[in-house]
Amino acid sequence: MQEIFTVYLNFLDFFFRVAWIWLPIFLAVIFFKSWMYYIQRWQWRQLDWIMLEVKPPKEVESSPKNMEQIFAGLWGVIGTVGYKYEKYILGKTQDYFSFELVGINGEAHFYLRTLSKFRDLVEAQIYSQYPQAEIREVPDYVWSVPTDVPNKNWNLWGARLKMANEDAYPLRTYVELIDVAKTDQPFFDPMAGLMEVFGKLKQGEQVWLQILFRPIDDVWQKKAKAIADKLLGKKPPEKKEGIFAMEARTWYEAFYDAAYAIIFGDVAPPRDKKDNKNEPYSLAMHLSQGDKDVIQGIELKASKKGFESKVNFVYIGRSDIFTMANVSATMGIIAQTANLNMNSLRPDPATITKANYLFAKGRKAYKQRVLMRMMRARSFWENGYIMNIEELATLFHFPTIGVRSPMTPYLEVKKGGPPVDLPMK
């Protein structure tokens, strides 16, 4: 016991002796974090957002491949922060979008929330794939419920959804729902179940599903490839140590040895270097078919453009008709994208609106109000998870011709262009 106490005192003595090294760094990090918190939020409040509602044409016979092309077109807004000055001094962040599936009082809606400067881009992408669609600007639906929800008359349940595994692992996408043996029939559209849930909502019930996404550069694809190589058992290529890395390693080892001697009063143990020369280059011959499918899925996901994303979900209802059945139905539809060998979306325990044990009622109400602020603001400060254009198109696309729900907001008339000989003033 005396020896442990002596080691502890030696450590404290050493810790405060070198405070001139770590204290300025610690204070600089605090200042930097505080500055970025302030300037990014100030810059975000200056943004001009608009809400667009889309009514798709009724004869959508294709798969969500069209929507995949739309997401690919929107990836082009990457690079809205070009210089370090814009990022760290002006507080600019990468611009993002929010595509939202909403059920209100038994009606389904498709909303696109975007910055006003991107309105023409978004409309052009939609019209390029769905020429007969109708797009109009509408008020934001999030203010259609009381601002103090939850209260004695209204209740809610919701959460932010997160990936169950590393985001390099793919979700189950619409490609796996196409029956290649029956090319004359439309594929099974998971949107059909969601439209049915929306259609059965009563007056005073709403379901919001928000998909926020911003383009990200292709560095994530290299990380995904590294994960696939690790599963495959490939040895990473040996890197030659540069002069600066060698100098940094030398200083680190010297500092470590000195600290070890001061704290423990003994010489630091020797460092062992691992020899990988006798290990096989790859373990591909020993992998099961399931492992090979996982590796192939990771590589296929990394072959398409990616977005940093997050998904928010909430069900709101009047207290007298509030039912968790609508939550279960919606989450069950989202679960159709789950691939148990790879990845799935599930509620994040940190944001889910429930609490147990001490002060459960108060803590639950607090989490509900935080979630509502998050749903209304649609801020995107934290790091998201990577979804490629195929996964995003699976979560958000317009119902195909196989969806028969009467509450699907189809455009019932066809639009035509003006005649070529129309006189102009």
Image (cartoon, grey):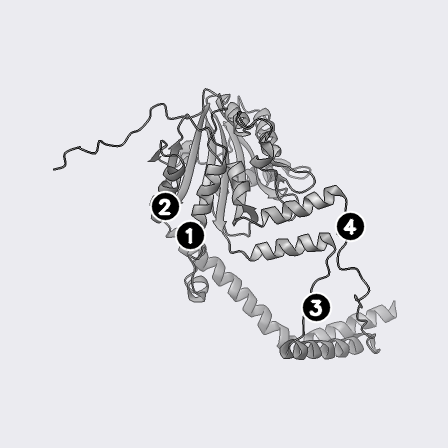
Q: Does 290 appear above or below 329?
A: below
Nearest to N terminus: mark 2 or mark 3: 2
Mark 4 to mark 2 CA distance (whole Å) = 48 Å
Q: Which residue is mark 1?
A: 77
Q: Which residue is mark 2?
A: 121
- Residue drawn 52% across the image and 66% down it: 31
- Residue drawn 61% across the image and 72% down it: 23
CB within 8 Å, label 2 to label 3:
no
Mark 1 to mark 4 CA distance (whole Å) = 43 Å
Q: Nearer the viewer, residue 320 or 197?
A: 197
Report the mark closest to the observer, 1 or 4: 4
Mark 2 to mark 3 CA distance (whole Å) = 45 Å
Q: Element type at marker 3?
A: loop
CB within 8 Å, label 1 to label 3:
no
Q: Which residue is mark 3?
A: 238
Mark 4 to mark 3 CA distance (whole Å) = 23 Å
**Residue 303: % across, % down:** 57, 49
Mark 2 to mark 1 CA distance (whole Å) = 9 Å
Q: Which residue is mark 4?
A: 285
Check disc 4 and give the amino acid type.
Met
Nearest to N terminus: mark 2 or mark 1: 1
Q: Is residue 53 left or right of residue 272?
A: left
Q: Nearer the viewer, residue 46 or 367?
A: 46
Q: Element type at marker 4?
A: helix
